[in-house]
Amino acid sequence: MAVQKIVRMALLSAILTIMKMAIPIPHVELVSLLIIIYTLLFEKEALMIVTVFTITEGFIWGIGLWWFGYLYVWPILCLTVLLLKRLIKEEFLVWAVVSGLFGLIFGALFAVAYLPLDPAYALFYWIAGLTWDVWHAVWNFILMAAIGKPVYRVLKSINAKVFAYSNDK
């Protein structure tokens, strides 16, 4: 079982990395959607998946100040989903709103990484990116509303079949 979890975490982290680069439009991404779905399905294990994803991003793109934001921004999304999971359950229109709100505050969360360097810079960084945050929010909402439920069902089904298969042996 432990090996199976490690393989699943590695595979799901790799999918996050691939999906981050799959859409060549700025601030249009499937990472938020997948992290929400991973957290719904795998709960606390999603935090490890996000950690592997973040480390992989650092290896690919280099460790910069942006990377330190990833260390807390994506886990915040996981923790938010964990807190809301029992209330929202599988209501994907509501998860679309959550995903949209996350896109809207993404820049503000990211600006926190700049506070130790210069609070004024952090503020201006956030303000300068507000238009992109709105764009990010709209697309997070659209993507989750359009494909969140089908992606969730497919991943849930694949996961159930893999565990059913491994338990038969």
Image: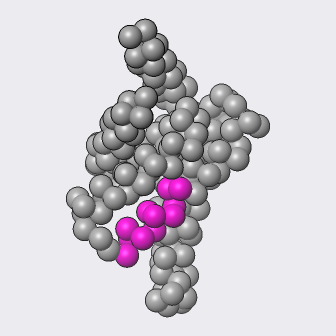
Residue 87, above or below 29: above
Q: Residue at x 38, y 70 (%)?
A: 66
Q: Main secondary structure of the magenta part?
A: helix
Pick the front one: 166 or 20:
166
Tell which of 8 and 57 is nearer to you.
8
What count of labels does the image hold?
0
User: Residue 3, how many percent across, how many down?
Assistant: 36, 33
Q: Position of residue 83 (x, y in %)?
A: 70, 47
Residue ID at (58%, 57%):
76
Magenta-tinted stretch = 65-75
Quarter the N terminus occupies: top left
Going by the picture, which residue comes out furthest to the right?
87
Position of 90 compared to 4: left or right? right
In the picture, measured across the screen, residue 61 lies left or right of residue 138, that is left
Q: Position of residue 47 (x, y in %)?
A: 51, 49
Specify the quadrant that holds the C terminus.
top left
**Magenta stretch contains residue 89:** no
Q: Is residue 48 above or below residue 144?
A: below
